[in-house]
Image (tube, rainbow, N blue to C red):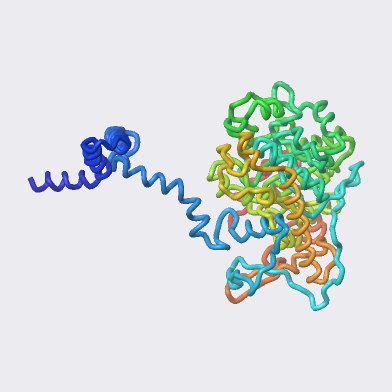
Amino acid sequence: MKKFFASLLDLSKRAVVPITAVILLIVAIVYGWFWVALLMAAIVLLGLFDAFQSRWAITRNYPVAGRIRWIFYDLKPYLYSYIVEDDLGGTPYSLAARRLVHARAEGITDTQPFGTERNTDEDTYHWVGHSIAPTENPIKSPRVDVGSDQCAKPYSASVLNISAMSFGALSANAVRALNLGAKKGGYFHDTGEGGLSPYHLEHGGDLVWELGSGYFGARDKDGKFDPETFKDTAQRDEVKMTEIKLSQGAKPGHGGLLPAAKVTEEIAKIRQVPAHEDCLSPRGHSAFSTPIEMLEFAARMRDLSGGKPVGLKLSIGQPHEPFAIMKAILETEIYPDFIVVDGGEGGTGAAPLELSDWVGMPLSEGLILMRNALVGAGVKSQIRLAASGKVYSGMGLARNIAQGADWCNAARAFMFSIGCIQAQRCHLGTCPTGVTAQDPTRQRGLVPEVQGERSARFQEKTVDTLMEIVASAGLEHPGDLEPHHLMHRNGPEKALPMDQVHPFLAEGALLEAPEDTAYADFWRAAQATSFRPALDLAKARAK
């Protein structure tokens, strides 16, 4: 009997909300409180539903009360962001990073009083070595010339540009705002793999047309590459360069994904796919399957575009693959005009969590590996190298350029500049600021003429701060930054120049003595005719 009453008491505690509602329902009926009675009746019915449903254990055992957990679970990101999160600890971007972008976009002061808030003893801390003799008048708006000897129409790029983001992943107004900013600021706007939309063309900003494995905007009815359709678009004056997307840092080897909720009739027409269904890009390209075939495809794209620069964009994965590309370049003597390395920390509108968290090389390591492949193979003079992945500040630009990049691309930072608040609802189509929403009522919050100005201000001010760093190091151009200018803490009591943290190969090192480099096994495994290793790396690297 004692056990029975204990069980009954436990049940009454767990069902305290619907039991209380029953009592209040009776009181409300007695006193004629109609609206109170209606509310209590709804809670009682919800309690009965929860107690007898079989899907959720928590509400079956705690009718109604179990739902309070769901409410706080949904509210947690907002409560954490606005109440709990400190300035430097937030992810993917800290509050300090978001404030910096917004301040520069708004044109208000971005200076800081009282010194740094960063822990300079942390293992992740790094800094640029300044000079006793700083440069008085560094270059105001540094540019990078893009185009190999095989390119008929070279392009002069800014050191900070808009990274690949597709229409569909972004709203029409967001694309308009970003392109307006690019036009005003003199930097390029990468279309992403979703095709060239009318909104990319409204303001006449410079465009890099990205072509992924779905060939959106340049595909036939079977989803294969259509050269004539590509030619018509690639030769437009607004398109300054074209780019083959091999992989993306946030979801390498996965292909692209635009959720069905965002595939409107308009987007479907631009991409030439069915509306209101998930829009998937294949994992790999159908136009090529080997390094040599890839370079031949790139050369074909360059010819079809009228001689404009063509590039590759990839997240670095298995280390032998960049060397396979180098061997194909040496064998065919076909030079892509640029290569963009996308870091594993890069962003996306939708991706499996495990791929975002655990697949793909982080930017620093991937950038250095590709830099060493280009320099070691003796082809860096022909091919520009760009970096993308969580770039938002002058120091981020300086770090990447010191490690081998010629310029940087940024995506989420430019999203912040036009109003993004990191609500992380990109994949649901319910973005509160209209940056990633296709709903016109949400998009109306984003006024392109206003946000385009903000975007241009952010880019200009960020490049200005990069040049402050360059000048403080006694240099003229960002390209003068070298690995030894970048110091990296290696424990609480030691710091090393970056060229002592990572290897940086000398020109032609892979051609002259590859066995003396850290990449000897990967260079031997690389082959121009396949992305697969030519030898058993497990056996070759067994010690």
Is 142 placed above or below 453 here?
A: below
Q: Please tell me in which quadrant of the rendered image residue 324 appears.
A: top right
Q: How many marks?
A: 0
Q: Residue at x 53, y 44 (%)?
A: 353
Residue 505 relative to residue 361: left or right: right
Placement of the C terminus among the 4 image quadrants: bottom right
For this view, does 253 lie left or right of residue 380?
Answer: left
Q: Quadrant of residue 263?
A: top right
Going 57% across and 46% down the picture, which residue do you hit? Answer: 356
- Give the quarter of the figure containing the N terminus: top left
Q: In the depicted view, which residue is nearer to us: 427 or 473?
A: 427
Question: Most extreme residue toward the left, as rendered?
Answer: 1
> As drawn, which residue projects farthest toward the top?
221
Residue 93 screen position, x and y as percent: 60, 55
Percent x, y for residue 344? 63, 50
Q: Position of residue 152 (x, y in %)?
A: 92, 41
The structure residue drawn at horizontal position 80% and vertical position 53%, both measured from the top left corner, is 377
- Give 246 or 90, whichever is nearer the viewer: 90
Q: Residue furthest front?
A: 32
Confirm whether residue 4 shows in the render.
Answer: yes
Instruction: Name the spot of residue 457 as percent of width and height, x first.
Output: 76, 54
- The relative height of residue 443 versus residue 542 in the rendered view (above or below) is above
User: Which residue shows up at 82% across the image and 59% down it?
Assistant: 507
Q: Is residue 92 left or right of residue 39?
A: right
Q: Note whether residue 516 is visible.
A: no
Q: Check the image and report above or below for 529 versus 2.
A: above
